[in-house]
Image: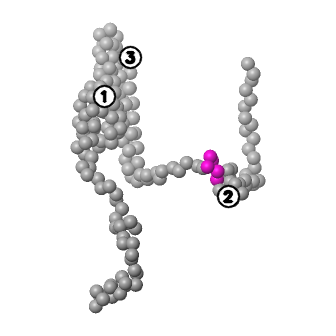
């Protein structure tokens, strides 16, 4: 088996920068159809205070899990009989099932864009049952009638073909006085 070569870790001096034209530019400065970069949708910006709040809640949740882990490790290390060990593992299984249910509820709620308050109200034991319930809830919170277009005003197709700006100006002046 041939040995693999590791890439060199030598750095080029930053003072000697060479500018190269972008790849894919033709003589007219246009990019070929094959090499056009994909347009990325504008990313939504989230306020810093919302991010801080989410980070704080995630840190608190992680700390809660760490304390539960320490308590469980202590229970398991103190278990001397088979019954004590089985009781501790049964308690752990119950906690794991509750956490798995919470994760499943959150995933389904996120998939169907349900608010947290409604995510708690989902009913069902399997993912399919939860998704069916989430679809029903989504119908209730979705806007009933959305407009076809949010553009306001007239479009050029709506106007008259024989519009005369001079006549329109004279008519406006007559109406003003």
Residue 134: give x, y in percent of width and height.
27, 36
Vertical comparison of 168 with 47: above or below: below
The reply to whether residue 100 is visible in this rendering is: yes
- The residue that label 1 is drawn on is 128
Is residue 92 shown above or below 110? above
Identify the residue under disc 3: 77
| Residue 155 vertical placement versus 21 (above, below) | below
What residue sits right under mark 2 in the picture? Answer: 29
Q: Around disc 2, counting alpha carbons within 10 Å, would you say few (fewer than 14), some (14 to 19), or many (20 or more)?
A: few
How far is the residue under mark 1 from the one under mark 2? 53 Å
Q: Are marks 1 and 2 in contact (CB under 8 Å)?
A: no
Q: Position of residue 174 (x, y in %)?
A: 30, 89
Assign a secondary structure to mark 2: loop
The residue carrying pointer 1 sits among few (fewer than 14), some (14 to 19) or many (20 or more) residues within 10 Å by Cα, namely few
Do the numbered discs 2 and 3 sit on residues whose CB atoms are within 8 Å?
no
Tag 1's secondary structure?
Answer: helix
Depth-wise, is mark 1 or mark 2 nearer the camera? Answer: 2
């Amino acid at each position: 088996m041939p040995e693999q070569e590791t890439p060199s870790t030598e750095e080029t001096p930053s003072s000697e920068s060479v500018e190269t034209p972008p790849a894919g530019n033709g003589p007219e400065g246009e990019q070929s159809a094959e090499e056009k970069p994909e347009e990325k949708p504008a990313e939504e910006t989230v306020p810093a205070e919302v991010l801080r709040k989410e980070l704080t809640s995630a840190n608190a949740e992680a700390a809660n899990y760490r304390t539960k882990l320490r308590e469980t490790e202590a229970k398991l290390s103190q278990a001397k009989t088979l019954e004590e060990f089985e009781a501790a593992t049964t308690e752990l299984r119950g906690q794991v099932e509750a956490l798995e249910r919470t994760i499943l509820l959150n995933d389904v709620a996120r998939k169907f864009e349900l608010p947290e308050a409604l995510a708690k109200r989902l009913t069902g034991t399997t993912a399919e049952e939860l998704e069916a319930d989430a679809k029903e809830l989504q119908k209730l919170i979705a806007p009933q009638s959305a407009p076809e277009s949010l553009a306001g005003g007239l479009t050029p197709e709506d106007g008259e073909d024989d519009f005369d700006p001079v006549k329109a100006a004279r008519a406006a002046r007559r109406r003003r006085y």
